[in-house]
Image (spheres, rainbow, N blue to C red):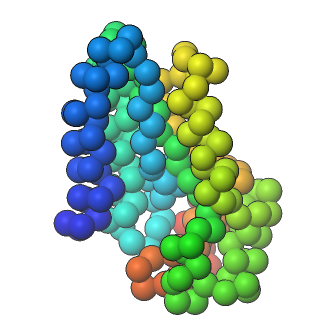
Amino acid sequence: MGPCLSSNLTSILIMSRFAIPHVAAVDGGSINNMSSLAGLRGGHAAIAYAVTKGAVLSLTQGVASQHGHQGVWVNSVAPGLVYTPMVSSKPGVDEQMRAERASLNVLGTEGSAWDLAEAVLYLAGPASRCVTGTVLPVDAGAASHSEAIGVSITDRGAIMAPVGVGAR
């Protein structure tokens, strides 16, 4: 769990500690963390990943609560099944796997890094000035659909959960 904890949670905690005084000093602003659908729902094949991404959500809410009075608003984006260069490099990720992943989402598509960037842009901008301590799923509806957590991409590659695993 060490590397996963360091990259997914400790790094956000350290960055927040250094950023908050500066953000507060310029009359506030936005801090946006990156969590995951796995942090909201669990069911990911890499348990440490799901645990640390869930902890990011708790950290987001805690920091928002503690520093809102300083004009600092803190939110988290929770990507679902997003196709990225890192995902494309994993064993077992082929067009068939991508089609299977996309079919598990309510909208029938994979997200992209551009979708995540648009969510962060919204949360960092003035349109979200009254939004803090929240999580914005960018997941093509996967959070509302139990089958979507049946596909995990880990360091070992693409993993399909057995039928019934992850269902509510």
Task: Name the image quarter holding the C terminus.
Answer: bottom right
- Name above or below for residue 59 compared with residue 1: above
* Residue drawn where x is 32% and y is 38% of the image: 59
Task: Give whichever of 4, 23 is nearer the camera.
Answer: 23
* Residue drawn where x is 56% and y is 53% of the image: 79
* Residue drawn where x is 62% and y is 40% of the image: 119
* Residue drawn where x is 52% and y is 43% of the image: 77
Note whether residue 88 is visible.
yes
Task: Give whichever of 24, 12 is nearer the camera.
Answer: 24
Residue 6 in which image quadrant: bottom left
The x and y percentages for residue 57 are 40, 41
Task: Give whichever of 131, 122 is nearer the camera.
Answer: 122
Residue most toward the right? 107
Q: Is residue 28 left or right of residue 125?
A: left
Task: Name the image quarter holding the N terminus.
Answer: bottom left
The x and y percentages for residue 138 are 63, 48
Note whether residue 146 is visible.
no
Residue 32 in which image quadrant: top left
- Name above or below for residue 43 compared with residue 164: above
The count of marks equals 0
The x and y percentages for residue 22 are 28, 23
- Name above or below for residue 38 compared with residue 152: above
The x and y percentages for residue 158 are 54, 82
Residue 84 in which image quadrant: bottom right
Task: Give whichever of 80, 144 is nearer the camera.
Answer: 80
Q: Is residue 131 left or right of residue 112?
A: left
- Name above or below for residue 46 compared with residue 157: above
